[in-house]
Amino acid sequence: MKRIIIVDNEEDMHYLFSRKFRKEIKAGEVEIISFMSVTEALSYLDSSEKKHIDLIISDINLPIVNGLELLQIIKEKYAQINVWMLTAHGYDENYKLAKEYGANDYLVKPINFEEIKQKILNL
């Protein structure tokens, strides 16, 4: 089973991921764990209850602590976790920073869920 954390402050994104992966979730191939903030995601990762995480998909534009800061923390503390950055702003300065900080992929909204499914299932 692939365990994926989604970090996005837009509830619509959490809903979209759960809907687009409903077959894989039902089949036990994928588990999606959603958080609205970096703080919530880090609290989960730091907890003793956490399970193995294969992937974190994080929006870049988040309040208080942004996705690029999360990326740096994850790569420092949990280097084995793949991190994909998500943005609605295309390939700008954030793309360069994400790659510099160790992002494994960079996704631009609107998301092609069929392509993402294949990438996830092949992790």
Image: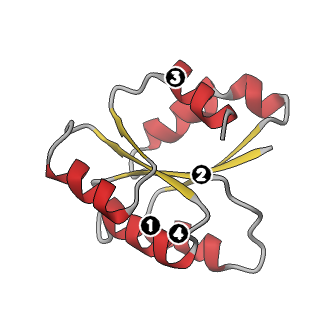
- Residue 55 numbered mark, or none: 2
Identified by mark 3, the residue type is Glu
Q: Residue at x 48, y 77 (%)?
A: 76
Identified by mark 1, the residue type is Val
Q: In this figure, which residue is indicated by the disc labeled 3?
A: 115
Q: CA distance from mark 1 to mark 2?
A: 15 Å
Identified by mark 2, the residue type is Leu
Q: CA distance from mark 4 to mark 1?
A: 5 Å
Labelled pair 4, 1 in contact (Cβ < 8 Å): yes
Q: In this figure, which residue is indicated by the disc labeled 4?
A: 40
Horizontal arrangement in the rendering, residue 46 relative to residue 10 (left or right): right
Q: Earlier in the sequence, mark 2 or mark 4?
A: 4
Q: Residue at x 34, y 26 (%)?
A: 110
Q: In this figure, which residue is indicated by the disc labeled 1?
A: 38
- Badge 4: residue crowd in 10 Å (few <14, some 14–19, many ≥20): few
Q: Earlier in the sequence, mark 1 or mark 2?
A: 1
- Badge 3: residue crowd in 10 Å (few <14, some 14–19, many ≥20): few
Q: Position of residue 41 (x, y in %)?
A: 54, 66
Task: Check the image and report above or below for 79 versus 118.
Answer: below
Quick one: quadrant of the N terminus?
top right
Identified by mark 4, the residue type is Glu
Nearer to us of marks 3 and 1 is 3
Q: How many marks?
A: 4
What element does badge 1 sit on? helix
What element does badge 3 sit on? helix
Nearer to us of marks 4 and 3 is 3
What element does badge 2 sit on? strand
What element does badge 4 sit on? helix
- Who is closer to the viewer here, 95 or 47? 95
- Badge 1: residue crowd in 10 Å (few <14, some 14–19, many ≥20): many
Q: Residue at x 61, y 64 (%)?
A: 80
Labelled pair 2, 4 in contact (Cβ < 8 Å): no
